[in-house]
Amino acid sequence: MMSQSSTLDQPSATRDNRITQFLRSYYIYFVLVAVVVLLSMANLDKFDLFERGNFLNHRNIINVLRVSAPLLTLAGAFTLLMVSGYIDLSVGSTMGLSAVVYAMLAINGVPFLAAFALTMVVGAGLGAINGLLVVRLKITPVIATLITLSLFKGVALLLVQDGVSAIKSGGGLKIPSWFNSYGREGTLLGLPMAFWVAVVVTLVLVIAQNRTLLGKYAAATGGNPTAAKLSGINTGKIVMLLYVIVGVSAALAGIARSSFMSLGDPLSGDGMELSAILVVLIGGTAFSGGEGRVLRSFIGALIIMALTVGMLTIIPAYYQTLVLGAALLAAAASNHLISRKETAL
Amino acid sequence: MTGQQQSPALSVEGLTKDYPGVRAVDDVSFAIESSTVHCLVGENGAGKSTLVKMLTGALQPTTGSMTVRGSSYEPSNTKDARAGGIATLFQELHVVDELTVLENLTLGMEQSRFGFLVKSDLDERVVQTLAAIEPSIDPSARVASLSVAQKQIIEIARAASSGANVIIMDEPTAALSEREVERLFGVIRRLRETDVTVIYISHKLDEIFRLGDAVTVLRDGKHIATKPLSEVAGRSELIEMMIGRSVFQDYTPRTTVTDDAVLIAKGLTNTLLKDVSFDINRGEIVGFYGLVGAGKTEIARALFGADTVSGSILFKGQEVGRSPKEAIAAGIALVPEERRTQGLFTSLTIRENIPVMNLQRLSNRGVFRSSVELEAAVEYVGKLNIATNSIDKYAEKLSGGNQQKVVLAKCLFADADLLLLDEPTRGVDVGAKAEIYDIIRSVADEGNSVAVFSSELEEVLGICDRIFLLFDGSLEAEVINGADVDAAYILNVVTGGREGVLQ
């Protein structure tokens, strides 16, 4: 590999272009710092959820990271899929269905590792269904995954008994005690397993993006599908694989959330597709594909979660959705401005 | 050249391609020596692109055979062609903007272990190939930051480093500036030194003399000659071989042409056009003739207000050229080059397509009058002889010629006084072509003006009263059509022979 830094030295890159490149690569970190600083300055004294005083407080940070686990788990895979020019709107339903399956397994006495592995297999299967619809039946990704959004959620709702809203202890069955600890109790640095799984998943996907054929071919597929095909790349296979990876990640996210909530809620992933899109856009991934970084989406997820949790304490609940929508608008607009600047050269 | 003892890089023997009713390539045989730049010339419709498609496996010959380096070569798709060592430089670029130059060069050829990219000599090899043909491109640069010309060189380097012995380039300079052309020629010459054979297709005869080792001339699908360029006595001999016969001409002077200038364009200039001025008279059919990239489409779009240009355009004494809406209101209609994507609503029916440029005519204070639409559809389907069993047929189901007639009907319904027709008979069969010419004449006979933008000499000589010759964005000469018109002169001007003097 050539050294990365020499990109900046090439003669055709104008100064403007270099600034754009720099902003593109690093702005996300500045945003994260800015959000944390802003939240730290806010007066949290009135609220129970947080320790008095500073947002930059040990317990608050652990709190934010703990509830972020599902989104952090999903962000990387979702990024790779969008880099390849595709999208999965069914991730929330995949999460919900996985949460239900995981809770059912646990409540019926299946041990932790087995329940964990089986749920991941279910996630892979759901991802494969999306892949088949898109690659084999050639249904537009938005439509295909909108269909499965509905289908997967429907199945999850059917699995839960009449009269109850979620799988939980009761009727002689009991959610085992280990169920809750995965997503809630600190194992390392005070953070639960679910968070560390998200970190590992992200690391694996960062390596996949930078060091494997999958990462490069995903970028080629999203950047110029014709060129990719003419280079002998089986783009269908790449897309299929990415949908499966997204499915598995969504299953892991479902496990994390059900563990956090101690129940298998079919609706626990509702709205997740919007959060995932928001995170990926904030991370600078082009909606049109080809461009995007797993790590930046991870940081984007931290930003969103810090904002969400921070807002719980500062802004009245009614405004939160509006604020998130505004954040999405800002992300989309800045994304557009940056990419337009580049093509204008 | 070292190619004397070697078998030729590529040879074809009795190659023929039949289409229903047309023999596009007719018993063509010639050989291309190794490590040469071999030029392929011929007028539009001479069979060049069909021949190239057979070489690249996109089409299969009806009869005849092809041989690559002494062994038989029968590609059934582009993959086979690449395996056979034949690569094509497509006119549209197939690079991934988001990847680096190096990543593009190795795309699809990477070495990997368990899916992980591993370093290999491939990286080094492609970097060397690139450095050999164009050292100024940084392999770690993002392709998005490169110019079109540089991207083109990336594709050439890709073909060369993937082991192609023959690279076919179809009009590679169409989108390049003069300096970029010079650089591309440097690349091609260095390729030749690395034992790559280049098949170079261009209408620009200067380029052929500057670059080529040998030339093959095709005319009407037949092979006319293959000879070293050193044995070709200048442009005039090449042009003679390309035209051959006196051009078939059925032009008869029209009587309705007036001296009353209805449109006056002065000093049209943009990135391509260079100070283009002309006028079009009432009742006249004028032609704009030039090669691909000479500026025909740009002039048409400028007159219609679809692109901004500097200069002035007066139509019936009124300034136009700022927006298509204004042009339509003033009475100008454009039939664009890409009729399927720009001229026609393919998912609408004939009846729905015809009134779209003048929907006000269908409206009675905002209420849609389907009776007018119906009458118009019936009228124009009859008048223009559109072959269809129903006016409710979807436009996409029509043949090319009938689609074009629907587009014409659209303009006629809009009561245009000036019709701008960009390549009006491209992809249209012979019968429909004649009918479209009749429509054009009758429109002009009624006192309207028509401008035909065409890259077919026969077309402009067949119907136009006056022909403007374009080369490289400037209007080089004006020719009054008639029995004494000199086709060789016209071809010389549009292929870059300035001052129009034949050597």
Image: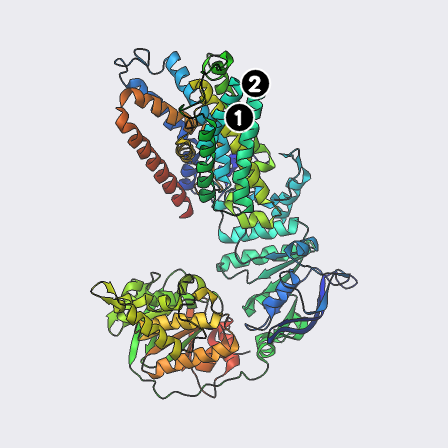
Asked if B240 appears above or below A87 in the picture, the reply is below
Q: Which residue bears the numbered disc 2? A: A110
Q: Which residue is mark 1?
A: A201
Amino acid type, callout 1? Val
Residue name at image x 54 percent, y 72 percent: B44
Q: Indicate whether A51 appears above or below B439.
A: above
Q: Position of residue B383 (x, y in %)?
A: 38, 79
- Left or right for B326, reference B85: left
- The amino acid pointed to by label 2 is Val
Q: Chain of mark 2?
A: A
Q: What is the crowding at mark 2: few (fewer than 14 residues within 10 Å), some, or many (at least 20)?
A: some
Q: Return the x and y of residue B99 as percentages of the image width and height.
A: 53, 42
The spot of residue A113 in percent (x, y) is 58, 19
Nearer the observer, B70 or A214: A214
Name which quarter of the figure residue B300 lies in: bottom left
- The quadrant in which the C terminus of chain B is found is bottom right
Under circle 2, the secondary element is: loop
In contact (CB < 8 Å): disc 2 and disc 1: no
